[in-house]
Structure formats: C-alpha cells, structure tokens
C-alpha cells in the first residue's frame, strides 16, 4: 500500500534525540526547546514562539489567551478540521461559519463581513492543504472593525502570500506571520514534524508570556504553586524539539520536495475533465501539504467510492474535511441549525487527497497517477 503520508527522517534526528537521552533532558525543559522555538518563529517572521504538545491545543491556547466571554463570536471557515471550532467552544466562544472559495478551498473572504456582529471578537483564518487564504482583505476587515486575527497555519509550513499586492509595497510573507497569533501543528504528516507537537507564534511580548504560563498550569515565578488563573498542561518535550531542530536544518529542501510533488501531480493529471485539481493563485506559493482532487459527479462516483477503487489498487487516500455545520457532535448540541454551505458540502462529498508525504518516491507518484487516470476515464 502506498501510504497517504510518510515522514522523512533523514537528517540528524537520531543524533539529537540521543543527546537528550544522554544528558537526561527528556521532558519539558532543555536547550532544544528554546532553539526550536527561536528558529521556527524566525523562519515564519515572528518574534516569539511558544511550543505546545500538539496543533489542536495551540489553537486552544491562542483562543484562551484572548479571554473570550461566553457568547463572544469567532468567525471561521466551515471547511476545516474540528480542532478550530472546538478551541472556540472550549473557551466559551461561539464559532460563526462561512463557506469557502470553490477554487482555493480556503475561507471565502467576500462572505466574512456579512457575519460580523456586535459580539464578534476575532476571525480565525485557516490555510487549507498548503494554500494560503487571501489575507489582505481579512487584515483590512479586521482593522476596520477592531477584530483580532488568529491564523491556523498548521498545513502551510513555508507557504507564502503576496501581501499588499495592490500597492508598491507588496512583499512575500510566510504563512504564520499574520494577526495577533498564529498556530502550527508538527504532527507526523506535516512538512516539519516532531511526531506530535505544535506552536503558537506572536509578536506581542505580553501575549507570549501569558501563553507560556497558560501551557504550564499558570505557574508564576514568584510563587510556583500559587495559581492566579487556571492553565493547561500543554507542555512540549525536549526530545520532540530535538527532532524539530533536525528537520529545520533542511527546511528549504522539504518545502521544495512538497512543491515538486504538487507540480508533478498537476502536470500529469491536468486535462482530465472529471477532476478538479488544486490551484496556485498568483498571490500564493502553496506547499501542497496534501494534494487534493475533487471528482465530478458525472463519474457516478463520490470520494468514498473513488477511495475504495484506489485502495483496491494499493493506494491509500484520505477524504476531505466534513464541514463544521455537518458534524454530528455539533448537530446534537443544536449548533449551526439549518445552515447550508454548498461549496464545503460538495468538497466533503467529492474530494479526497492522494499520497503526498515527503517520503513519496517518483515511482510511487507514477503509480498513483496511472491509477487515477485509469479510474477517471471510466
């Protein structure tokens, strides 16, 4: 079976983890943690990095740091992983959904302003499958309405966005450099992996200090076991950070391998009428975290049927996200009653992503392309 994603641990990961074991720095303190936080924040164009145990809690910590009151609203795309909505709910907020753009599958920025109310406190932007959201309109909207931006860049390590492209001051910025806080995952299928792990980035020194306290049970320097607030145990380990530091030593090669996979799939699959392939807008440099395709209904197959046919040929895939408004757990809670988001609904029904991991070989990619083309012609 060709796996949908397999990490590539071909650098100094073993050496650095062995150093942790040799010195005994295996828990949530150690030089690798500081090094990883500093290097990743600098790579993304941020001042501060606060490592946590996974990407889901990175979102939760970022939302918690906002100090939402019950009922405060955060606008977000419906087409994303459930972690985004659950972070808002855990912190007492209310997720407010918008549909996504049918080309990029990221938040439809033209629909955001209609969802702003007197209770809106923030906009959560999610870069989907390695392609950036169109940030300029979101930033302008947030400034106009006094809203905070939280950026979920978990799937966009190294992706870039052409900011200010309508002015003479346009410049490429990496995803993760926008808004008050940006969140990353370092799960095994991400471009930079630590197995599990995550990070919140910010340029705000006070927010960074608050996030460090929140991740560590809100211990205080003056009196460690006296707690002014309820925090979390979201700590990250030195051994995980050691893997991350080793990965960052070859981050440019990692990004280029991902972009190569995306370009090769597009070159070899374009021209098939029943397949919608990922786009790369002129203002974006995608990293193709996962290479997704959307199957036309004209084939008589949905994504589940297509996935089974590929699995029968030894190719593992994953379905696209199910929109938040269609999640059974949220329906049982009475959330998003009667809401319809047709683009997200079609993507969930007809979309899947192909093997896209860093360990994917050209021979495996060729096998996948052959199978997809064969099935798409039926």
Image (cartoon, rainbow, N blue to C red):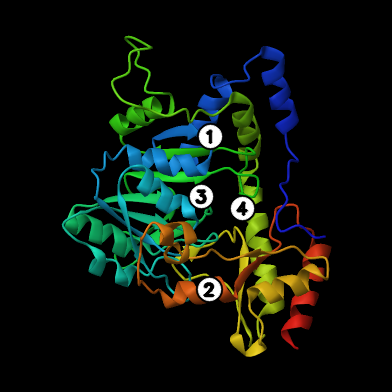
How far apart are the two marked residues, 2 and 3, measured between alpha carbons? Answer: 20 Å
The residues bearing labels 2 and 1 have C-alpha atoms spaced at a distance of 30 Å
In front of the other: label 2 or label 3? 2
Q: Secondary structure at mark 4?
A: helix
Task: Mark 2 or mark 3: name the one nearer the start of the chain.
Answer: 3
Q: Is residue 378 left or right of residue 231?
A: right
The label number, if any, that marks residue 347 in the structure image: 2
Q: Secondary structure at mark 3?
A: loop
Task: Compare marks 4 and 1 and give the one earlier in the sequence.
Answer: 1
Neighbourhood count class around disc 3 (C-alpha, 10 Å): few under 14, some 14–19, many 20 upward: many
Q: Would you place residue 231 above or below residue 371 in this image?
A: above
Tell me which numbered mark, 4 or 3, is placed earlier along the sequence.
3
- Which residue is denoted by mark 1 in the rendering? 53
Local crowd at mark 2 within 10 Å, few (<14), some, or many (≥20)? many
Residue 154: assigned label = 3
Whether pointer 1 and pointer 3 mark residues with C-beta atoms closer than 8 Å, the reply is no
**Which residue lies most toward the top here?**
223
Residue that badge 4 annotates: 255
For the N terminus, the image quarter is: bottom right
Q: Are marks 2 and 1 in contact (CB under 8 Å)?
A: no
Disc 4 crowd, CA 10 A, few/some/many (<14, 14-19, 20+)? many
**Percent position (x, y) of residue 356?**
68, 60
């Amino acid at each position: 079976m060709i796996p949908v994603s397999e990490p590539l641990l071909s650098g100094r990961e073993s050496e650095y983890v062995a150093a942790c074991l040799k010195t005994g720095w295996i828990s949530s303190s150690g030089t690798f943690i500081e090094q990883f936080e500093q290097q990743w924040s600098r790579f993304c164009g941020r001042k501060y990095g606060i490592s946590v145990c996974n990407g889901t809690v990175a979102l939760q910590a970022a939302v918690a740091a906002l100090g939402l009151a019950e009922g405060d609203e955060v606008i977000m795309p419906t087409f994303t992983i459930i972690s985004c909505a659950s972070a808002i709910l855990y912190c007492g907020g209310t997720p407010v959904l918008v549909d996504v753009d049918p080309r990029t599958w990221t938040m439809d920025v033209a629909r955001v302003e209609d969802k702003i109310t007197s209770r809106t406190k923030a906009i959560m932007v999610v870069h989907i499958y390695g392609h950036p959201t169109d940030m300029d309109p979101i930033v302008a909207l947030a400034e106009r309405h006094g809203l905070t931006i939280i950026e979920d860049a978990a799937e966009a390590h190294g992706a870039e966005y052409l900011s200010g492209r309508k002015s003479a001051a346009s410049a490429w910025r990496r995803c993760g450099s926008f808004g008050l806080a940006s969140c990353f995952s370092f799960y095994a299928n991400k471009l930079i992996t630590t197995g599990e792990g995550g990070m919140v980035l910010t340029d705000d020194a006070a927010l960074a200090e608050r996030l460090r306290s929140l991740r560590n049970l809100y211990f205080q320097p003056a009196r460690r076991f006296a707690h002014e607030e309820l925090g979390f145990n979201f700590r990250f380990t030195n051994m995980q950070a050691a893997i991350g530091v080793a990965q960052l030593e070859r981050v440019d090669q990692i990004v280029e391998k991902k972009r190569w996979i995306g370009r090769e799939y597009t070159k070899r699959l374009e021209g098939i009428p029943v397949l919608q392939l990922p786009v790369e807008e002129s203002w974006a440099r995608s990293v193709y975290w996962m290479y997704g395709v959307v199957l036309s209904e004209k084939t008589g197959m949905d994504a589940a049927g297509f996935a089974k046919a590929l699995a029968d040929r030894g190719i593992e895939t994953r379905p696209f996200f199910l929109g938040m408004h269609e999640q059974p757990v949220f329906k049982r809670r009475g959330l998003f009653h009667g809401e319809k988001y047709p683009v997200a609904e079609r993507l969930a029904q007809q979309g899947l992503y192909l093997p896209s991991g860093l360990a994917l070989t050209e021979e495996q990619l060729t096998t996948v392309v052959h199978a997809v083309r064969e099935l798409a012609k039926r």
